[in-house]
Amino acid sequence: MYASRDLRDLMTSTAKLERKRPRRKRTNKLVVIAVVLALLYAFANQELRLWSVRAQERRIEDEIRAQEIKSQILKEQIKALQTDEYIEKVAREQLGWIKKGEIQYLPEQRH
């Protein structure tokens, strides 16, 4: 009687362990899947951020190039505006100045 009771208890314990093992495996699989999904999400999120930052970097580099071109054009304009020829042209056209010995002709104003 003791042997059969011990055997029955052993069989019951073994059956309980066998039932618990698949649950552990299932739980372990769920944990692994959850970790993999979390890692994939983190990786995808970082890739999206990196893509966004690179796009912003390209836009800023394009703006820098455009500003450098504008700066170069303005420097050339400043250099041209500081020449004696340009200063004389502005003085003649806008201020009506003439050189010594020149005669200035003014068109008649019609009413």
Image (cartoon, grey):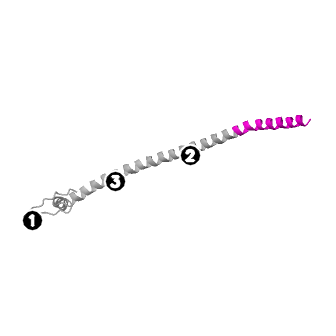
Q: Position of residue 49 (x, y in %)?
A: 50, 47
Compute the Cα span from label 1 to label 2. 81 Å
Which residue does the image show at 20% across and 63% down from the upper left?
A: 95
Within 10 angstroms of label 1, few (less than 14), some, or many (20 or more) residues?
Answer: few
Residue farthest along the left direction in this orientation = 101
80 shown above or below 29: below
Location of the C terminus (image quadrant): bottom left
Q: Which residues are magenta?
A: 1-25
Marks 3 and 2, how far apart at CA:
37 Å
**Nearer the observer, disc 1 or disc 2?**
2
Residue drawn at 76 percent across, 38 percent down = 20
Q: Nearer the viewer, mark 1 or mark 3?
A: 3
Disc 1, SS: loop
The residue wearing badge 3 is: 67
The relative height of residue 96 versus residue 44 in the rendered view (above or below) is below
Q: Which residue is mark 1?
A: 100
User: Type of residue at label 2?
Assistant: Ala
Taking depth in this image into account, of 79 and 51 the one nearest to the observer is 51
Residue 55 forms part of the magenta stretch? no
Q: Does dot 2 land on a helix, a strand or a loop?
A: helix
- Residue at x 86%, y 37% (from the top left corner): 6
- Earlier in the chain: of badge 3 and badge 2, it is 2
